[in-house]
């Protein structure tokens, strides 16, 4: 029995992890869909289910309201909407999942950016009765801006349109026409009813005309191995490891998470900003030595030469380095109720590096409903997205966000309050 438990726990730890986010207009059924996914995948504890049953009865519902599994805030339960980003974890025999259930309201765009920034996939819900709406455009644009590699369009509430193929095909055509204007690589469609459970975990008998997989099948089989940049080697140093023990007296290693490319023992590397070169002596993960490391592994790299390296430096390949500069253009989502100050100074975090920056110019704002560029308005308020030019107090080692989501992302911080005010993607 013990051996079986050890095997199952090891198998669980070794399973591939898929992060996905949900988005859609208000009342499109995001929370109900996640509740159905958890319930039908048998990923709910008995006490959770009992609590949801009691809350459903209290609300006067005749059936169990599965949306209550994710609407954790009391204000959400009272209003029946999602306000904050709710994270849920579950696993199937094939894969582990982290779900970010994001709000649908216009005023919570920043929360969607937060939930989607690390996602491998985005589920965009569309009400079969309403079709593609402005909110659908908004969420698809943000998913495109954040370079989420895979989008699954769930046409929900098919039970309310009598499960007709025509309603599904019309939405599929309209969405495809809009997505063609954006940088969306992989789009899949599935007709579902989150309330009834059609095509969520189990194949629907009400839609024999649909020959694709269920939502769970799609999530289990999306290939995410190639989502990371395995070409451009980037290792931002988080921490210098110097064990205070006799057996490791001379050991000096650099801890961090591989942000791109593949690092191998014996290969030559360059250290930024000094430009000194060396060879990789060892790569250590937990207590074992590895021959190579790749994203998103967290490892300790030691070098053959004793070079002065500290937090914020970056280890790269000799002939394949990032851009180095202080004048940078970013697409930014403003996340503070206090408007952005043109020529204002903010703290900036980029990979493991800290600096300060000046907002030099606002090139344009984006109307996320029409994708039009607004050039005559330099003010940026809460939830607005704009292309901005900044100048940093020291050079950053960066790639475009399109090339690498780790080295191409920055956040701005208000130094007075220490709150995050902007999330940016380097153009």
Image (tube, grey):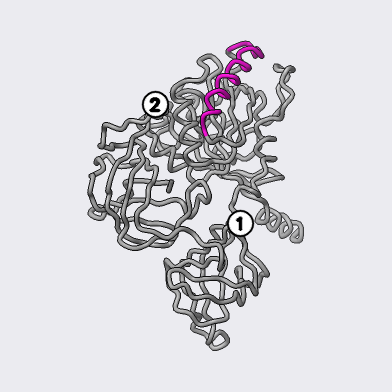
Residue drawn at x 27%, y 53% as measured from the top left: 358
- Is 170 covered by the magenta stretch? yes
Q: Using the image, tell me which numbered label, if any, was put on residue 3.
A: none
Relative placement, left or right, of 50 versus 104 is right
- Percent x, y of residue 159: 61, 15
- Is 247 covered by the magenta stretch? no
The answer to whether mark 2 and mark 1 are in CB contact below 8 A is no
Q: Nearer the viewer, residue 9 or 230?
A: 230
Q: Quadrant of residue 44?
A: top right
Q: Nearer the viewer, residue 96 or 68?
A: 96
Q: Nearer the viewer, residue 320 or 359?
A: 320
Above or below, 289 against 56 in this view is below
Residue labelled with disc 1:
231
Q: Using the image, tell me which numbered label, if any, was put on residue 79.
A: 2
Q: Quadrant of residue 416?
A: bottom left
- SS at badge 2: helix
Determine crowd level at label 2: few under 14, some 14-19, many 20+ residues with C-alpha closer than 10 A: few
Residue drawn at x 66%, y 23% as measured from the top left: 198
Residue drawn at x 71%, y 30% as measured from the top left: 213
- Percent x, y of residue 386: 35, 38
Q: Earlier in the sequence, mark 2 or mark 1?
A: 2
Nearer mark to the viewer, of 2 and 1: 1
User: Real-space Cα distance between discs 2 and 1?
Assistant: 47 Å
Magenta region: 161-182
- SS at badge 1: loop
């Amino acid at each position: 029995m013990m051996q079986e438990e050890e095997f199952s726990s090891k198998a669980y730890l070794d399973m591939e992890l898929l992060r996905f986010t949900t988005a859609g207009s208000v009342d499109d059924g995001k929370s109900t869909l996640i509740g159905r996914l958890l319930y039908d995948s048998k990923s709910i504890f008995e006490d959770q289910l009992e609590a949801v049953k009691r809350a459903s009865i209290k609300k006067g519902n005749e059936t169990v309201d599965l949306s209550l599994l994710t609407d954790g805030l009391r204000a959400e339960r009272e209003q029946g909407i999602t306000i904050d980003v709710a994270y849920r974890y579950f696993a199937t025999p094939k894969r582990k999942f982290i779900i970010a259930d994001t709000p649908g309201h216009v005023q919570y765009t920043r929360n969607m950016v937060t939930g989607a920034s690390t996602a491998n996939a985005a589920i965009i819900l569309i009400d079969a009765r309403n079709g593609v709406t402005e909110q659908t455009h908004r969420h698809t644009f943000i998913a495109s801006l954040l370079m989420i590699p895979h989008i699954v369009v769930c046409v929900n509430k098919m039970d309310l349109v009598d499960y007709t193929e025509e309603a599904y095909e019309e939405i599929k055509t309209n969405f495809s026409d809009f997505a063609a204007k954006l940088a969306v690589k992989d789009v899949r469609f599935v007709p579902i009813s989150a309330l009834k459970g059609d095509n969520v975990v189990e194949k629907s008998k009400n839609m024999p005309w649909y020959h694709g997989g269920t939502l769970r099948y799609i999530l289990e089989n999306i290939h995410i191995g190639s989502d990371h940049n395995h070409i451009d080697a980037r290792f931002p140093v988080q921490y210098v490891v110097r064990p205070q023990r006799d057996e490791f007296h001379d050991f000096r290693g650099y801890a961090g998470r591989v942000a791109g490319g593949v690092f191998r023992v014996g290969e030559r590397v360059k250290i930024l900003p000094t430009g000194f070169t060396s060879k990789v002596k060892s790569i250590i993960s937990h207590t074992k030595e590895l021959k190579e490391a790749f994203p998103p592994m967290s490892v300790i790299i030691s070098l053959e030469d004793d070079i002065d390296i500290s937090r914020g430096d970056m280890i790269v390949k000799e002939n394949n380095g990032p851009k180095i500069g202080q004048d940078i253009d970013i697409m930014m989502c403003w996340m503070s109720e206090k408007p952005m100050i043109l020529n204002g100074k903010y703290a900036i975090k980029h990979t493991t590096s800290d600096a300060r920056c000046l907002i030099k110019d606002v090139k344009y704002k984006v109307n996320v409903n029409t994708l039009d560029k607004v050039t005559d308005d330099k003010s940026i308020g809460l939830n607005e997205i704009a292309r901005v030019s900044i100048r940093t107090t020291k050079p950053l080692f960066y790639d475009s966000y399109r090339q690498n989501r780790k080295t191409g992302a920055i956040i701005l911080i208000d130094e007075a309050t220490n709150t995050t005010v902007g999330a940016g993607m380097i153009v």
